[in-house]
């Protein structure tokens, strides 16, 4: 495979640029669709025109969701592009108008009886699952006037809070030093990349300490934004007579009993799970792992830049063992230039997958730095993209799977890729490096994310009474950290609540535990893969195809045969995760002989 440089995506086969005639033309079409809906919903009985109304709505939704995704792509490739934020807010307003107009239409839809013949029509049959969810939705008790008022406030005061958070982050510009004594300036995306992938412990320490000092100085600003986000949400929930956990459970389609059962299993086994941290400390010859070393790459591996070509070849070989369908998809992503992995100064940090519903095109955004962690990142994001790709011909509403289920294909890709690398017999260092990645994942999904969940639940509980000061927020974070990590780390990541963008999202609420759910289900799928052998892929693909029309509880019951309200399933998944920890422990012992 010839690849002279890192792949860069193109947006020219989508909407080109936010100022292009194509992009602006789509905005005009969205406005026209909203106008059509206004007229259609004002005329006669909604019950008699449901099919037509939903066809109009779906066209509008596909367009506005695609343009929002395009804005994310454009702002990520250049964080200094000042044009995007205004357009993004405008599109959020159009989406809100679209949803507001459809509220009475959805109210009419949920009144249809289960045996109504209209459910058999091609325009409505895929909305039946959504209609059931709408009946039970936490906001269903709000009056039309209350919903309109809240929508107005959200458009003017809520969605913009995420932008406020981004603006504060842009103030971060640190002088950091590496182990050679060289000093350079880094912004937030570069800091996050260093903490996750740099083998230089001096540099990681310098970055962590610099970030902590920055957050200390600006903590009041972050606390204000966090308080405002939670305050608006809690006001909504209070008006609806709803607690603050139900909305996230509904958004992620998982029962409270199942979620509590999962966390209960993790908490009962927390001492065992902490070995994923303490074993790494022992390998490094220290009593406790430094917080800034939690995501550090394996020291067992000689510093080697892994070419992108090698990563793609290995990934295709690994996933090709499931089916040739997946490597064929990866090659198509590269051929179509739908994957971004280049290194540029103005790029955003992190990685993500998105899609343009209207065009049925996925996109993957990454920055590839040649480490094993970045190999895993490619596997993760391409798992998301393939998940969408196999569902792209379904109505968009059936591809709107919740985050709990969106993380299955991504984390399963990771697991299959690591398993492949472990069986390549490339020597002790490579084996150790892969196992290091495995136990990093265990610590991240089974300790770090529970910290974030516990913190956020405690924060929302206290925020019901009043706004919290930055000192009080720090205290909540410290408590959550010690609950899960215990004394396995030296200190806590006290300002995690400021540095983690997930706490500041306006489209997702309590955006943490879905990763743990997805990771554990992927571990359960590894068990199923061992049981079913060649028959596994057919079952796996069928499971993914149902992710947009079943709850987590029902999906696992239908395709894996387990009740996730029982500890049995979760403990089996934890057992599989812990097998990686035990494998690393054995490898560590062998290295000492």
Image (cartoon, rainbow, N blue to C red):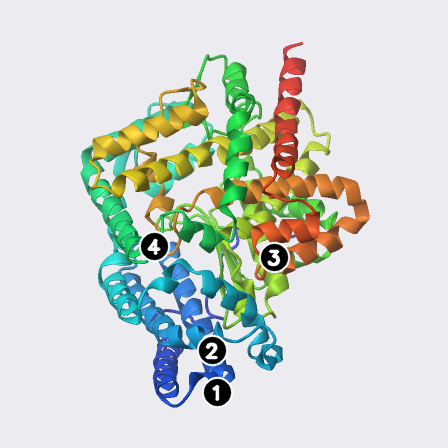
Q: CA distance from mark 3 to mark 1?
A: 38 Å
Q: Secondary structure at mark 4?
A: loop
Residue 59's tag is 2
Q: Nearer the viewer, residue 284 or 143?
A: 143
Residues under numbered marks 3 and 4 in contact, where contact means CB atoms less than 8 Å apart: no
Q: How many marks?
A: 4
Q: Secondary structure at mark 2?
A: helix
* Mark found first going from the N terminus, 2 or 3: 2
Q: Nearer the viewer, residue 565 or 482?
A: 565
Residue drawn at 60 percent across, 69 percent down: 394
* Mark found first going from the N terminus, 1 or 4: 1
- Which class describes the residues within 10 Å of circle 3: few (<14), some (14-19), or many (20+)? many
Residue 430 at least partly seen: no
* Mark found first going from the N terminus, 2 or 4: 2
Q: Nearer the viewer, residue 442 or 295?
A: 442
Disc 3 versus disc 4: nearer the observer:
4
Disc 1 versus disc 4: nearer the observer:
1
Residue drawn at 38 percent across, 29 percent down: 480
Q: CA distance from mark 3 to mark 4?
A: 26 Å
Mark 4, residue position = 506
Residue 386's tag is 3
* Mark found first going from the N terminus, 2 or 1: 1
Q: Would residue 47 appear left or right of 378 to someone viewing this image?
A: left
**68 over 224 or under it: above or below:** below
Q: CA distance from mark 2 to mark 1?
A: 20 Å
Q: Would residue 48 appear left or right of 346 to someone viewing this image?
A: right
Expressed as whole percent of the image width and height from the top left, the position of residue 339 reads 53, 56
Expressed as whole percent of the image width and height from the top left, the position of residue 453 reads 41, 38
* Mark found first going from the N terminus, 3 or 1: 1
Residues under numbered marks 3 and 1 in contact, where contact means CB atoms less than 8 Å apart: no
Q: Would residue 541 appear left or right of 92 to someone viewing this image?
A: right
Residue 48's tag is 1
């Amino acid at each position: 495979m010839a690849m002279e440089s890192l792949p860069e995506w193109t947006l020219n086969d989508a909407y080109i640029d936010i100022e292009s005639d194509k992009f602006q033309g789509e905005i005009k079409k969205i406005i026209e669709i909203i106008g059509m809906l206004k007229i259609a919903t004002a005329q006669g009985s909604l019950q008699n025109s449901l099919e037509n109304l939903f066809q109009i709505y779906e066209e509008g939704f596909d367009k506005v969701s695609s343009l929002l995704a395009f804005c994310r792509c454009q702002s990520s490739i250049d964080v200094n592009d000042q044009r995007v934020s205004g357009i993004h807010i405008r599109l959020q307003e159009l989406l809100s108008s679209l949803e507001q107009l459809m509220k009475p239409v959805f109210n009419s839809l949920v009144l249809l009886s289960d045996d109504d013949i209209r459910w058999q029509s091609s325009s409505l049959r895929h909305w039946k699952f959504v209609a059931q969810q709408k009946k039970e939705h936490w906001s269903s008790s709000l009056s039309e006037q209350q919903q309109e008022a809240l929508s107005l406030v959200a458009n003017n005061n809520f969605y913009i809070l995420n932008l406020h958070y981004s603006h504060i982050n842009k103030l971060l510009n640190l002088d950091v030093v590496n182990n050679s004594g060289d000093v350079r300036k880094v912004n937030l995306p570069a800091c996050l990349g260093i903490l996750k992938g740099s083998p230089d412990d001096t540099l990681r320490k310098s970055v962590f300490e610099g970030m902590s000092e920055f957050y200390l100085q600006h903590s009041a600003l972050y606390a204000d934004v966090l308080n405002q986000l939670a305050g608006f949400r809690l006001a909504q929930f209070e008006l609806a007579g709803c607690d603050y956990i139900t909305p996230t459970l509904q958004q992620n389609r998982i029962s409270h009993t199942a979620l509590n059962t999962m966390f209960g299993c993790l908490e009962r086994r927390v001492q065992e799970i902490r070995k994923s941290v303490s074993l790494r400390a022992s390998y490094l010859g220290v009593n406790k792992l430094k917080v800034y070393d939690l995501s550090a790459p394996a020291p067992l591996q000689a510093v080697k830049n892994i070419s992108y070509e090698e990563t793609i070849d290995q990934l295709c070989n690994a996933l090709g063992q499931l089916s040739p369908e997946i490597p064929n998809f990866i090659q198509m992503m590269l051929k179509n230039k739908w994957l971004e992995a280049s290194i540029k100064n103005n790029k955003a940090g992190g990685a993500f997958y998105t899609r343009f519903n209207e065009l049925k095109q996925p996109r993957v955004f990454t920055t590839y730095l040649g480490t094993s962690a970045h190999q895993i990142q490619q596997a993760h994001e391409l798992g998301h993209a393939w998940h969408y790709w196999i569902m792209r011909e379904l109505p968009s509403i059936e591809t709107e799977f919740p985050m709990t289920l969106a993380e299955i294909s991504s984390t399963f890709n990771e697991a299959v890729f690591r398993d492949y690398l472990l069986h390549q017999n490339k020597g002790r260092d490579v084996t150790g490096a892969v196992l290091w990645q495995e136990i990093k994942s265990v610590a991240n999904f089974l300790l770090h994310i529970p910290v974030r969940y516990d913190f956020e639940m405690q924060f929302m509980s206290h925020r019901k009474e009043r706004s919290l000061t930055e000192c009080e927020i720090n205290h909540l974070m410290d408590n959550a950290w010690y609950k899960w990590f215990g004394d396995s780390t030296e200190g806590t990541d006290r300002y995690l609540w400021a540095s983690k963008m997930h706490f500041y999202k306006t489209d997702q609420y309590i955006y943490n535990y879905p990763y743990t759910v997805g990771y554990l289900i992927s571990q359960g799928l590894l068990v199923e893969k061992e049981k079913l052998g060649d028959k596994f892929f057919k079952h796996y693909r069928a499971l993914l195809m149902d992710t947009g029309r079943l709850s987590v509880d029902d999906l696992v019951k239908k395709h894996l045969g387990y009740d996730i309200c029982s500890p049995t399933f979760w403990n089996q998944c934890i057992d599989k995760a812990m097998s990686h920890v035990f494998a690393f422990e054995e490898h560590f012992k062998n290295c000492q002989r």
